[in-house]
Image (tube, helix red, strand yellow):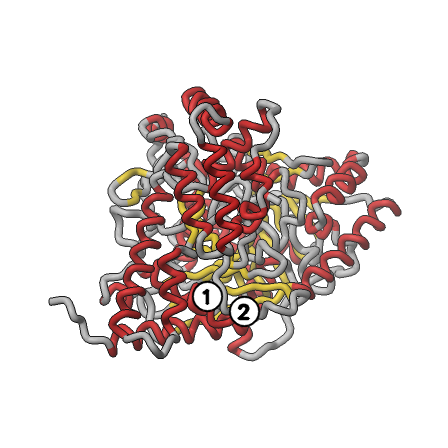
Amino acid sequence: MWGICSRTMVGMAKPCGLMKPCHLVKPVSAARVSGRYLTHQKGLPSLPVPPLQQTCERYVRSLEPILEVDELRQTRELVDEFQKTGGVGERLQRSLEKRAQNTENWLSEWWVLVAYLDYRLPVVVHSSPGLVLPRMNFSDKQGQIRFAAKLTAGVLDFKTMIDNETLPVEYLGGKPLCMNQYYEVLSSCRIPGLKRDSVVNHAKTSKHITVVHNFQFFALEVYNSDGTPLTADQLCIQLERICSASLQTNVEPVGILTTQHRDSWGKAYVNLSKDKTNRESVSAIQRSIFTLCLDGAMPQVSDEMLRSCAAVQMLHGGGSQWNSGNRWFDKTLQFIIGEDGVCGANYEHAPAEGPPIVALIDHAVEYTRKPEMAQTPMVPLPMPQKLHFNITPEIKKDIEEAEHAMNILAQDLDMMVTVFGHFGKNVPKAHKMSPDAFIQMALQLAYYRMYQRCCATYESASLRMFRLGRTDTIRSASSASAAFVRAFDDPSKQNTEKVDLMEKAVNAHRSYTNMAITGQAIDRHLLGLKMVAVEEKLSIPDIYTDTAYAKALHYKLSTSQVPSKTDCVMCFGPVASDGYGVCYNPMNDHINFAVSSFNTCKETNAAHLAQAVEGALLDMRTLLEQTPKAKL
């Protein structure tokens, strides 16, 4: 149930408020500033607990565009009962405030459990986002290995900044942001459990990466004996050795087990771990810095479908007949390099949101474009270590079940990546509107035109202004957005009124965004109050069993803005079976969109929504351009 909230990326936060937005990370000297990170973290404020009455009022207001009048009336009564003086709401609020005084962040521990580790659907499609890079200009094995080597060297260069605590602190609106997530994305891995998963981090000891080629896994040491990272030339030699040692293709794809429903994978993991060799191989994967997946070429497709097919590769690998077994989806970070120049990444969501991942990838991609500076030491390199697996009949059966389930999921996902080329951030900015709010209103209009109703919409907002902050929800469907979309195609309405409603809707979204990033949104607060009731073994208050609460959390539009320096786009699956996942990267003169839906739902269609969004954006611009400004 709570997994529907786990789609979390960047919200409105610009990656670095005090740097040019196009530079997420600037390389800095590798001198260690001991304790700098901890000193910075200690200076950050704690996540506040919003006032109870404020949240209750905002909760009811957020339901107005998605509920019928009689439903809303009933919910109002339940909310009034919940927040009354001396009532259960006040008791839960006091306990939550007490927890906030005694913890670094009252939410973060609960959130990682509720949104991720207790969530039992497969991480593939349902939780882990993919990232599609622009197609690289190589189309053979040699080019693939060369690019993979340079990209790896770029990641290791970024890792030096993390290890030395010399990463530039990021800012939002002049305020420093929590940098903790950067310390969680490398050398970490999710571990399946029978009912709850866990995450391990081996940052202190990890010296190797995992390489997967033809479903075979290798541990590759990436540091010389003097502690310096291997150069791109050295990595090239090692990756060639790995490819030569894994030419056979009839190997059992152990990696596909990580695509399973978490309970099934938890059981299969126990089976797999009974054998000492398997245990050691799995441990080597878990302890590695990241996974590098060297994929075979995909079937040829038309240019306009290329990015959509690439997104499918990054999200789930295309099914068992393609690359879904050439992954370890529990690994926090997997770089995926196809032989045909299709490249990107996939990341397991529990340790971090999109921005730190994008910053790392931006740095690594920029690194690949630089001429090789480091002198390659002429030292013999140890052979990469092949990780062996002993496949029992029981494990073989688990693999077959995983393949079957993965293929059903792959066939179910409808994925559309489009480039809206007519304009980008430039147009809303010219009209003094927030680009993110403008795009969100276009999404609201597109959805309304398709379905003649508004729906609960999730956009993530970064809480990194606070220590260990993760995300809260920007509820993009508001009374203001509902008034705007209902009026837009109404011939009885004047253009000046429509523009006025658009501005009100955009401003309402901007205002909700500011509320969310400053810790004053409603969703995580309501979750916190519910978690207190669970922990104190109190009966769950009626507002949580009310159908309105379920409707509020049934996000038919799950959206995220993930800006980057590289011309890329993130993608993820819908969080509701009858909904859409929409991720976008607004560049100055174009916008990259990734829209997903499920084929089993007859009401949804990713290509139709993508088309409707394009139409909405163009019509909104036309309205603005054709309507003379009344205000002087």
Residue 49 visible in image: yes
At a point 57% along the width and 57% down the height, the residue shown is: 574
In depth, the one of 263 and 485 nearer the eye is 485
Residue found at the far left of this picture: 632
At a point 88% along the width and 47% down the height, the residue shown is: 393
Residue 47 visible in image: no
- Tag 2: Cα neighbours inside 10 Å, few (<14), some, or many (≥20)? many
Label 2, on which residue? 416
- Tell me: residue 483, above or below residue 71: below
Is residue 261 left or right of 612 when viewed as pictured? Answer: right
In depth, the one of 595 and 242 nearer the eye is 595
Label 2 SS: strand
Residue found at the far right of this picture: 393
Query: Pointer 1 and pointer 2: residues touching (CB < 8 Å)?
Result: yes
- The answer to which quarter of the image holds residue 176 is top left
Label 1, on which residue? 593
Q: Position of residue 225 (x, y in %)?
A: 52, 36
Mark number displayed over residue 401: none
Is residue 455 left or right of 431 when viewed as pictured? Answer: right
- Tell me: residue 487, above or below residue 174: below
- Tag 1: Cα neighbours inside 10 Å, few (<14), some, or many (≥20)? many
